[in-house]
Amino acid sequence: DAMVIQNPRYQVTQFGKPVTLSCSQTLNHNVMYWYQQKSSQAPKLLFHYYDKDFNNEADTPDNFQSRRPNTSFCFLDIRSPGLGDAAMYLCATSVRHQETQYFGPGTRLLVL
Amino acid sequence: GEDVEQSLFLSVREGDSSVINCTYTDSSSTYLYWYKQEPGAGLQLLTYIFSNMDMKQDQRLTVLLNKKDKHLSLRIADTQTGDSAIYFCADLTSGTYKYIFGTGTRLKVLA
């Protein structure tokens, strides 16, 4: 089935040690989004790609970067994770802007 | 900025109907969505309604939209224990890519 896939589902890293989360999609959607969701809160948009065009939200910390090497894959890099970066990270896709977003299962990040 | 609000908790008995409410401030909504999130999982799209519609029904789900009052509701008929989850409403404004999420309503279904 066409879907949004996130790996790994759980990731443990150490304080300050770079970590990469990955997302892939078989929907052939143009737009890919990364969200951060902390416990009992709504997801917060970090950034998104429309094709190769990167769009950063104004309040996304510099510690968070992203790469989209092709249509199917998008990566979230956290350069120096702090304890406050422990959260669920959700990837989503949409055909284009102003369209329904489809979410992956998420990666739960734990920072020790 | 625009805002979307939901009540935090709802508890119902199995077999009853659940009604989850959402209010929003945006006057330029195009679509309004309902997503379900089970513990440790991503957001599952349940249904959505276009802003020029008043009602949409999909099996056990009924969405009602009152544009005048900027009120959206999701009714789940014959609620089951598997419906226990957090439900988010989300507003997509005309001319933007960005969802505005509500705070989420935690639905607990009692057997």
Image (tube, coloured by chain):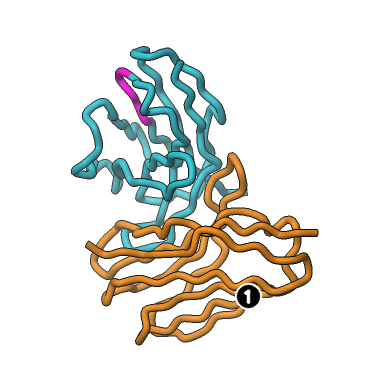
Residue A16 percent across, percent down from the top left? 34, 13
Q: Is residue A76 above or below residue B44?
A: above
Quadrant assignment, res A101: bottom left
Look at mark 1 in the image and give the residue it sits on: B58
Chain B, which colour?
orange
Which secondary structure is most common in the magenta stretch? Answer: strand
Chain A, hue in figure: cyan
The residue most toward the right is B111
Q: Residue furthest left?
A: A58
Q: Amino acid at mark 1?
A: Asp
Image quadrant assignment for residue B4 = bottom left
Which residue is at a point 37% across and 79% down the rendered structure image? B70
Q: Where does the image place residue B103, in percent across and percent down from the top left?
A: 43, 56
| Residue at figure coordinates x 53%, y 30% from the top left | A7
Identify the residue at image location x=33%, y=34%. Answer: A68
Given the image, what chain letter belongs to the residue carrying mark 1?
B
Name the residue nearer the viewer: A59 or A97: A59
- Magenta span has A104? no
Q: Position of residue A103 (x, y in %)?
A: 49, 49
Q: Which residues are magenta?
A: A76-80
User: Position of B107 compared to A98: left or right?
Assistant: right
Could you tell me which residue is drawn at 35 percent across and 46 percent down? A44
Label count reads: 1
* A85 lies above or below B12: above
- Horizontal side of A53 relative to A73 (left or right) equals left
Q: Residues within 10 Å of mark 1 (few under 14, many from 20)?
A: few
